[in-house]
Image (tube, grey):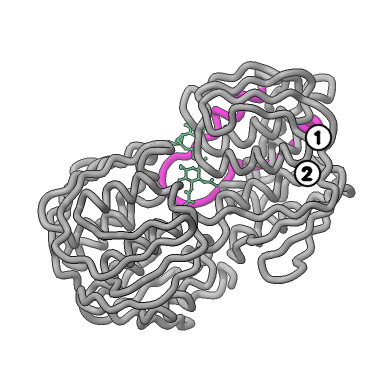
Amino acid sequence: MSETIKEKFIINGFAGKKSLKGKLRVSGAKNAALKLLPASLLFEDKVLFSNVPEIEDIGRMADLLRGSGAIVKKKERGVYEIDPSKIKNGDLDYEISKRLRASVVLTGPMLSRFGKVTFPHPGGCVIGARPIDIFLEGFEKMGARTSAVKKGDKESFVIKARGGKLHGAEIFFKQQSVTATETFMMAGVLAKGKTILKNSAMEPEITHLAEFLIKGGAKISGAGTTTIEIEGGGMLKMGGQEFKVMPDRIETGSFLILAVLAGKDIEITDCNPVNIEALIELLKLSGAKIKIGETNIIVKENKNLKSVSVKTHEYPGFPTDLQSPMVVFLTQTKGESLVFETIFEGRLNYTESLVRMGANIEIWDPHRIMVKGPSNLKGKVLESPDLRAGLAFVIASIVAKGESVVHNVYNIDRGYEQIEERLKKIGVDIKRVKN
Ligand code: EPU
């Protein structure tokens, strides 16, 4: 599917009935794979990844790598081999980078390897300002200088390491940032000397990326804590080992919310529940009964759910990426729930559409809403604004009465692999239709 092919989902809701049954398999993590693929640039030999989600964003990242001379081969579904030996330079394709926020993480390995990178301001979901100041300040500390170049109406940043090579540095992140932590962890791998990252983000995808780099010989300690140390060295080597992408925790959480709302007997498989403890805790507080295994979660019919307040937070707190499905959940619980989105300022706009569906939501300011429930939602025509709110609309449509149409399926495909096929298997009445 591409951005130019317009498709929509047509969903017939169950009006709050608990009827879904069967297994829901969780895919590999988008936000892990989107960093692992760029990390292959730090390797001198081929790297092989399995459990890669087959989604739009991965296709774009693979194209960015190809544009720089890497050979990216899809061996079979979810299995990708990358040969980084022929990479020529650190120039990122303008159009693709603009459309993918994760393109910014390529600056780390590119600068580390070539001492230079050219890239535009990265795009991605429209959920807030999403600046890159933390990146530019960090690279300065590692001995690089940034300038801007303009070709026609296309403006790019050029970052160059003095003397052609980054040096290690101590960087205190003024704000915890997932992609900045990952970018500088990679930048430190081939830099001269030691890099110390303080106030680092602690998301599981960061630890996963560190495990991959360490497998290739990188000297990294502290990933998963707020202080990470990287001892710079030579190119990494995989020696033919395969690396399996971790399960997607946001998909796991979204499926869990759906299962609690509409499940009769659902098993979520191939997941790692430890990574969504914050969500599980809140769902339990609201009265949900869920059985947590090591790699699966079982949900039977849940009734009489109570309101709970939610504040998004960096990991291990409640993830901003689960805020929108959680709001749908709260529309079905009894009482008042305050939702405080602390990470992004544009990430509550979608709630206006839930109000149109019949939700009782007061929008207080760009960061806070009050949800009063339970409400009977009604099917509506909806426009998916970003991938997470898009999936939240799918969940809301399943819970609602009557038919909903969710436009902009492209946005959902960016992050979720064949979502309608998986949902159909558990009994959801959903069709993908061309506009
Ligand atoms: N920030 C700055 N300056 C910067 C970088 C970030 O001020 O240079 C601010 C952001 O504006 C935001 C805060 O720092 O207020 C934290 O943002 P962060 O940098 O952690 O977000 P990100 O790394 O751009 C990743 C995920 C997002 C997820 C956030 C928060 C990827 C590719 N993206 O973004 O995922 O919401 O962390 O957990 O890993 C999604 O998958 O739908 C998605 C948006």
Tell me, yes or no, whether the two marked residues, 1 and 2, touch with CB atoms within 8 Å.
Answer: yes
The residue at the point 79 percent across, 21 percent down is 192
Mark 2: give few (<14), some (14-19) or many (20+) Cα within 10 Å.
many
Mark 1: give few (<14), some (14-19) or many (20+) Cα within 10 Å.
many
Q: Position of residue 344 (x, y in %)?
A: 38, 41
The residue at the point 76 percent across, 27 percent down is 160
Residue 53 horizontal side relative to residue 416, left or right: right
The residue at the point 36 percent across, 61 percent down is 256
Span shown in magenta: 112-139
* For residue 209, above or below residue 253: above
Q: Position of residue 255 (x, y in %)?
A: 39, 63
> Is 413 colored magenta in this rendering?
no
Q: Position of residue 67 (x, y in %)?
A: 78, 54
Which mark is on residue 113? 1
The residue at the point 67 percent across, 17 percent down is 169
**Number of numbered discs present?**
2
